[in-house]
Image: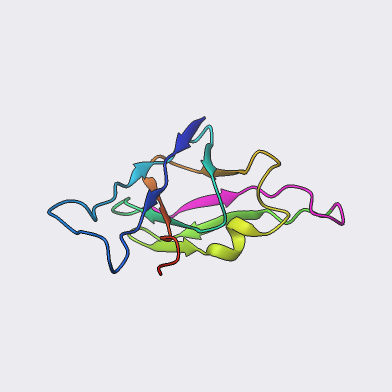
Amino acid sequence: MAALTPVTIKGPFDTIGAGSADFVWTAGSTDGDTIAITGRQVIMCWNTSADTAYTVTIDSVDDEMNRQGDITTYSLAFGDFAVFGVGLTNEQGWKTAAGIIAVDVENAAVKWAVLTLPAMYP
């Protein structure tokens, strides 16, 4: 299991130089990955396979009513992208008490990128 590192998106008043707005796609682990979240993350996935559909799963945890609702085997056709939004990363039922979300891929051809929205501006 590997930890995916979120990258903070540059804001409109940040200095933007060559390469400073880049982010990296990380190959998913079939043993699962984790993401430390604060509630401002966007989780993206991309199936880089040239000819095979693969799935992703985002694991839930018990919410205040002891319910779970995993996003299970979300299918990505080859070349497809998907994004899971901010509501997922700040609502009960997704992050653990330690502020972690667990994600899984069917095949390492699926890559993840996690972007953190910038803090509010003056």
Q: Is residue 30 above or below residue 112?
A: above
The image shows residue 18 at horizontal and vertical percentages of: 12, 53
Considering every residue shown, the one lying at the far left of the view is: 18
Queried whether the magenta region covers residue 54, the answer comes back as yes
The image quadrant where one finds the C terminus is: bottom left
Q: Nearer the viewer, residue 47 or 102?
A: 102
Which quadrant of the structure image shows residue 5? Answer: top left
- Please give the range of residues in magenta: 52-66
Q: Nearer the viewer, residue 52 or 65?
A: 65
| Residue plotted at (50% across, 52% down) | 55
The image shows residue 96 at horizontal and vertical percentages of: 68, 43
The image shows residue 45 at horizontal and vertical percentages of: 42, 54
* 74 relative position to 4: left or right: right
| Residue plotted at (41% across, 60% down) | 118
Q: Is residue 30 above or below residue 54?
A: above
Considering every residue shown, the one lying at the far right of the view is: 65
Q: Nearer the viewer, residue 7 or 120?
A: 120
Which quadrant of the structure image shows residue 77? Answer: bottom left
Queried whether the magenta region covers residue 103, the answer comes back as no
Tell me the chief SS of the magenta region.
loop
* 8 relative position to 37: left or right: left
The image shows residue 71 at horizontal and vertical percentages of: 63, 56
Give the image's coloring scheme: rainbow
| Residue plotted at (64% across, 47% down) | 59
Q: Nearer the viewer, residue 46 or 54?
A: 46
The mark tally for this picture is 0
